[in-house]
Image: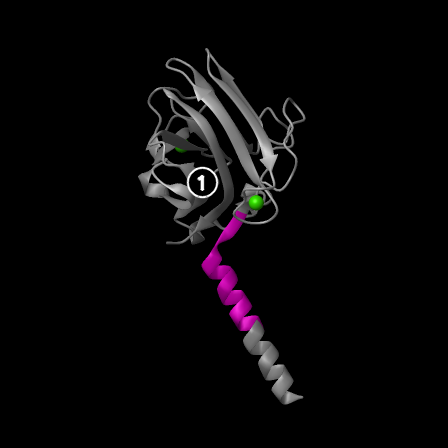
Amino acid sequence: MKKIFFMAAIFLGISVACFADNGTLIDDFEVSVTSGPEGTVDFGAGNGSAVTVTRDTDIKNSGESSLKVVYDAVEGGYIYVAKGSGLDAKNADWQVSPSDIKWQEYNAISFYVYGTDSKEKIAFDIKDNGGEIWRFIAQDDFKGWKRVVCSFDKFVLRDDWQPENAEQNWKLDFPIKVFQFEPLAGSSGTLYFDTVELVKE
Ligand SMILES: [Ca+2]
Ligand SMILES: [Ca+2]
């Protein structure tokens, strides 16, 4: 009996250690994608750019599916594919509430992207607690899945646009509420995203 208890304790210890090492999964893109006010993803495009967003079950990194983004980003246009709280799409929340996360335990947000080595640039934005938008630039310079780690201190305040109602204090305020993918102008193609986590690197 003692031996069983001992083994169980070791197993639990290993499980807790693994969980801590793996960080917190905040979105795995496991639900069907719908748009509009009741949408599960907040997405759209304008000024000549176009985007289609769906759930894909063939190409995925974790769970049963990923987020498939087919896009045409033109000069002067814009695209946004966002998830989080307080968005126009009411059901786009992460699987963990931002207020329940112990933010001080993490120093980066990571995601997986399935690239095609197009050399195109992808912006990964986060919206902070005051509504300011911060940007990290990734590049599609690989084929297949790649983990992109965005250290909080590597995000740069967007200088081309900020929401009118943002509290502009040039400081990354926690909790972060939203993350957003935006393929940058002058590119078109298909990208898949999966496994968005908060991590300590
Ligand atoms: Ca997934
Ligand atoms: Ca701020």
Q: Position of residue 149 (x, y in %)?
A: 38, 45
Q: Tell me where residue 73 appears, x and y as whole percent.
A: 42, 20
Tell me, yes or no, whether the highlighted magenta stretch contains residue 24: yes
Asked which quadrant contains residue 141, the reply is top left
Q: Is residue 81 magenta?
A: no
- Dominant secondary structure, magenta: helix
Residue sticking out furthest to the top: 47
The residue under the point 39% across, 41% down is: 143
Quarter of the image containing the N terminus? bottom right
Q: Nearer the viewer, residue 77 or 69?
A: 69
Q: Secondary structure at mark 1?
A: strand
User: Dividing the image into 4 quarters, which one contains the C terminus?
Assistant: bottom left
Image quarter of residue 140? top left
Residue picked out by circle 1: 113
Residue nearer the viewer, 107 or 82: 82
Depicted 3 relative to depicted 15: above or below: below
Q: Quadrant of ligand 2?
A: top left
Residue under the image location 52 percent in, 70 percent down: 14
Q: For the residue with label 1, is its CB less than 8 Å from the closest atom of ligand 1?
A: no
Could you tell me if residue 130 is visible in this image?
A: no
- Reply above or below: 4 against 159: below
Q: Residue at x 45, y 34 (%)?
A: 128
Q: Nearer the viewer, residue 165 or 76?
A: 76
Magenta segment: 12-25
Please state if 140 lies on the left or on the right of 54 as rendered. Answer: left
- In percent of width and height, residue 23 lies at 48, 54
Q: Position of residue 108 (x, y in %)?
A: 40, 46
17 vs 112: above or below: below
User: Residue drawn 57% across and 47% down?
Assistant: 100
Three-letter residue code for mark 1: Val
